[in-house]
Image (spheres, rainbow, N blue to C red):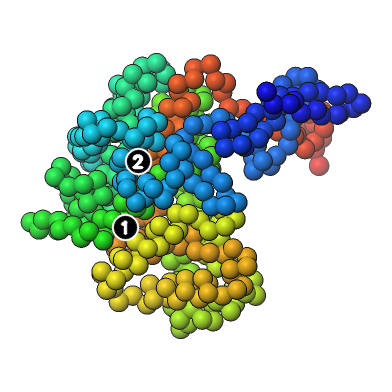
Amino acid sequence: MSKPAVLKLDDKEFEFPTIEGVEDEKAVDFRTLRSVSGYVSFDEGYGNTGSCQSEITFIDGEIGILRYRGIPIEQLAEKSDFLESSYMILYGDLPNQTQLDAFRASIRDNTPVSPLMGAALKGFPSDSPPMGMLGAMLSALSCYSPELATNDRAKDLENFDQAASTAIAQTATAAALAYRVTKGLEGNQPDPSLSFHDNFLHMMFSEPGKAYEAIPEVSRALDLMLLLHADHEQNCSTSTVRMVASGGANLFASVAAGVGALWGPAHGGANMAVIKMLEEIKASGDDGSKFIEEAKSGKRLMGFGHRVYKNFDPRAKIIGQACDNLLNKLDIDDPCLDIARHLEQAALADDYFISRNLYPNVDFYSGIVLRALGIPADMFTVMFAIGRMPGWVANWREIAMHPKMKINRPRQIYQGPALRDYVPLESRT
């Protein structure tokens, strides 16, 4: 049994239990701190606070480890795919063939959206932000599928399988419809004969009367991008999903809140920032060489380094290879992609960046992959949301399966005016 932690405050000593995770993570359990001492802990941004105990994802940023349900991301990227890994993230274990077939069928069957919802999406202005449309759609699922979103935990858990498949499948459908609306195009009906990722590209780009033709390198790159984003521990959007779920909100309301959190440029917009940087470099007439030197003097190099990973982002190694295969296959003439490759090669060979662990991260490569696939920058965060949906759904389920869990309610340190009296209007200066 772990030794308790001892905290001395106001000449009094207080003991608090400690918690150890399965990967030797250690925490002090301060849940009784306020009740026994009158103090609360202060940790702005929660960067050093364990908000929950979870069984879904493990990260060790110091040495570049990412595991879903205990399985290294490298193994999943090599041997699995997005939907198989999504099943494991949702339910805890890899599926057998029967379970996997049933899950794929459920995703396929739930891909079409309600005609009424499709009409509602068409009603958005053509210049609407796709993330705004996606968030609205996910919120609306509570209206179009009320039996799956009762805000009664027991009932919602009974219908979890259907709700989970609906959230994952229709996020992709709504994303494609949002893109088509912004282009003034009619939506494409899902094709049940295609894989999840190829069906998405079909719904995005297929032309009338022309069957979608899958390209293995394209399919592989998109599926990998989704798999690598499927969960990432307690980030801003996932923590938001859990926060909303802790109040008893249904799955669709909770993941819609996750979309809102992801929309923020400091969270989900990193790959968009990479493309913006590349466009600015191109517009300046630079091939990246000048920018690399400016980065050594403090100019920010987007898509390099990571807040969590102090070493190489393990996802970047995986998507980087798929990115190379994709660009070689498509043979795209795009100066921005040429600049990206130049930046990557220079940074990986330059001691300045190597010594500071400023390696390309997953956002760098995912932005390049999405650009190569013809997906516009304002859809990048939507693509992130499609990939992250299984993790959000799994975190909602983890909350919902513990009915005695308290509603999330952080404390604060009040710094406003002290007690004062109301001043009548005629006496105010």
Q: Residue at x 61, y 27 (%)?
A: 409
Q: Residue at x 10, y 56 (%)?
A: 211
Question: What quarter of the picture does the C terminus occupy?
Answer: top right
Whether residue 132 is visible, yes or no, is no
Is 163 above or below relative to 365? above
Disc sitting over residue 426 in the figure: none
10 Å neighbourhood of mark 1: few (<14), some, or many (≥20)? many
Residue 270 percent location from the top left of the image: 49, 57
Q: Nearer the viewer, residue 30 or 156?
A: 30
Whether residue 61 is visible, yes or no, is yes
Q: Nearer the viewer, residue 331 or 97?
A: 97
Specify the quadrant of the image occupied by residue 220. Answer: bottom left
Question: What quarter of the picture does the N terminus occupy?
Answer: top right
| Residue behind mark 2 | 85
- Is 118 left or right of 305, judged from the image as shown? left
Residue furthest out toward the left: 209
Q: Residue at x 39, y 48 (%)?
A: 75
Count of numbered circles on the image: 2
10 Å neighbourhood of mark 2: few (<14), some, or many (≥20)? many
**Label 2 amino acid?**
Ser
| Residue behind mark 1 | 221
Residue 79 percent location from the top left of the image: 32, 48
Is 327 above or below relative to 10? below
Q: Residue at x 34, y 35 (%)?
A: 94
Residue furthest out toward the right: 11
Secondary structure of the residue carrying tag 1 is: helix
Secondary structure of the residue carrying tag 2 is: helix
**Label 1 amino acid?**
Ala
